[in-house]
Every structure is written in structure tokens, then in C-alpha cells.
Amino acid sequence: MQVHHLLEAIRATAHEYERTQPAITQALRGIVARAERFEAHEELHSKKEWQLPAPPAGRQWHRNDGWTQADLPDGFRPLMADELDGGLYADIQWKPSLLSKWQTEGEWHAEGTGWFRTTRA
């Protein structure tokens, strides 16, 4: 008789688990989703805002405004103020306005406006 009662208890427990398992799974998914959103929020707000790096001692960038991290991928830096001599150079790219794309062709002038970047060391 004990086996019969044990079997009935196991069946009842299995039935209860099957009945509540979707609700438990859904609740756990909700908890995980909230935790992931919280983690993403924390990560977003804990990152420091990008800033233009400081130029080498005793020198200055040709301009300090309008730069974004995307403008200076690895290997690029802004042109120095004393490097603005006009002309056409293979290691210099420029964009005439914030909405422009980076260009490598065409002559630019030292008195011209825009942003200039280079791969020079």
C-alpha cells in the first residue's frame, strides 16, 4: 500500500509541475529580461563620454571642436595646427563640414575650414 500512495504522490507532484512549469518558465524569463535591461542601462551610463585626446606637449590640434570617436579610428589623429600648409598629401584626409564624408582627393588650403586627420606618427 505504501508504494501505491508514493506513486499517487509522485503523479500529483508531476501533474502540479506540468501545470505550473510554463508559468515558472515565463516568470524566470521575465526576471532575466529585466536583469539584462538593467545591465545594459548600467553599462550605457557607466561608460565615459569620448573626448578628443590631448595633443603632444607644446603642440595643438588644428581644431578642438566637432570631433567624434568615429572620426579618429585607430591609426588616425587630428592634424596639428602647424601642419596646415595646404597641398595634397597621401597621409591626410579632410571633411569640409560635419555632415561631409572624409575625402582624400582634391586640394585644400591652409586657410580652409574643415576637419583634417592624418596617419602621421
Image: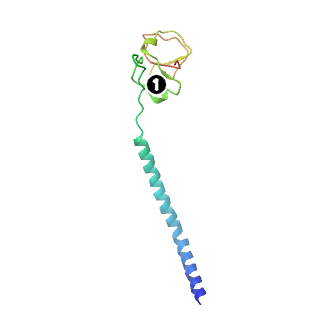
Quadrant where the N terminus lies?
bottom right
Horizontal relation, residue 105 to residue 54: left or right: right
Q: What colour scheme governs how the chains and residues are painted in the rendered image of this protein?
A: rainbow
- Image x and y of residue 117, in percent: 49, 20
Residue name at image x 50 percent, y 66 percent? 24
Residue holding disc 1: 99
> Eyeballing the image, is 92 above or below 13?
above
Q: State the residue in front, 31 or 23.
A: 31
Total tally of numbered discs in the picture: 1
In the displayed image of the protein, which residue is found farthest to the bottom? 1
- Image x and y of residue 65, in percent: 39, 23
Horizontal relation, residue 92 to residue 81: left or right: right
> Eyeballing the image, is 31 above or below 60?
below
In the displayed image of the protein, which residue is found farthest to the front? 57
Residue name at image x 57 percent, y 79 percent? 10
SS for dot 1 = loop
Residue name at image x 48 percent, y 56 percent? 32
Q: State the residue in front, 57 or 12.
A: 57
Residue name at image x 58 percent, y 88 percent? 2
How would you rate the neighbour count of disc 1 (Cα within 10 Å): few for under 14, some for 14-19, many for 20 or more? few
Instruction: Tell me which corner region of the image, top left, top right, bottom left or bottom right, holds residue 47.
Output: top left
Q: State the residue in front, 120 or 105.
A: 120
- Image x and y of residue 120, in percent: 52, 18
Under mark 1, the amino acid is Leu
